[in-house]
Image (cartoon, rainbow, N blue to C red):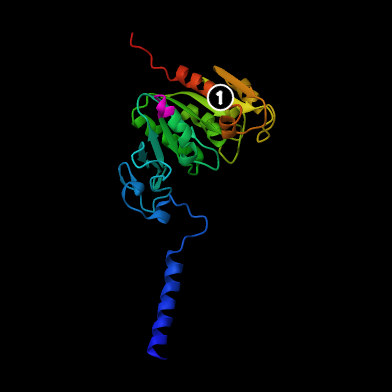
Amino acid sequence: MHPCRRRAVLAACAALLASLTFGCAPGSDPTDTAAAGGTGSQSRAASGSAPSPSVSGGMSRPLCATPDEGEFRQPASEPGAVTPVLLLGSGARGVVLGGQADGGICQMLPYGRELANRGYHVALFEWRDPYPRAMTTATGALVAAGARRVVLGGFSRGALVALGIAPTAGDSVVGVFSVSGGPSEGEGFATIRSLSRFRGPILLVSARDDDVFPPGTTTSIAARHRGPEQVLILPGYDHALRLLEGDNGPTVRAALLRFLARTTRIPKPE
């Protein structure tokens, strides 16, 4: 073979090999450590470098957050596994926000910023299976950062997991809010009873015609609950974050703020 033709063939083979080795996998997450492979503030956790890809659940700092926004942690949820958590704000009044099944830190960041700007210490986190453990881990990270009175809450999956774990998430948990929550075997809480065991105050919000859960789910949770509760049933069929963003948004936001202010109030020393 002529030397020039030989060099051309070798170059083509090398290019093909490179594309197979370094090409992006379909559906890869650009914030995942293995996919991003970056350096600097976009790929470092607050306690140092992001975990290696061999650590289950590890990821780089979410790109939706600015490099100096909050504190990004990856606490262990079990041996060899972590739950990515972004902490916003500071102080003793804490809120753990759980997103929908299709979301995590970036989905909840806009509302988390709203609450942090109002003086709350907020934990956002990525869903890692098992989901109850992920939210419990985020709660522990928030308490370790200084939150003393913590409300668990969320939207759809975040709502029902918050209700489910509240009785066992620690003495710092003083309330739960649920926006469009209901029983789900896949999320770990299959019955109305499993969502009604927390004895502290709860706020239950849903749309009257939301068909994600059977009619009457919200009122059934309230009826089974043994403690103070507030139920807010709104017109329409919006589910979860759509209730926060649609026509009912101002009403939902106001109800959430009143609930948070009441439940996280720090008692004055006697």
- Look at 32% across and 41% down and name the residue there: 46
Quadrant in which the C terminus appears: top left
Against 141, is 22 above or below?
below
Q: Which residue is drawn at 44% across and 77% down?
A: 12
Q: Can residue 123 be seen in this view?
A: yes
The residue lying toward the viewer, choosing from 125 and 134, is: 125
Residue 156, located in which quarter of the rendered image?
top right
The location of residue 178, given as percent across then percent down, is 55, 28
Does the magenta-highlighted stretch encompass residue 265?
Answer: no
Q: Position of residue 62 (x, y in %)?
A: 41, 44
Magenta segment: 115-121
Residue drawn at (35%, 42%), measured in percent from left and top?
A: 67
Q: Mark 1 points at which residue?
A: 250
| Image spot of residue 171 (x, y percent) | 41, 24
Quadrant (top left/top right/bottom left/bottom right) for the N terminus: bottom left
- Is residue 60 found left or right of 25 in the rendered image? left
- Left or right placement of residue 226 versus residue 139 in this view: right
The x, y position of residue 203, in whole percent, is 55, 22
Residue at the extreme left of the image, as rendered: 48
Q: What residue type is labelled 1?
A: Pro
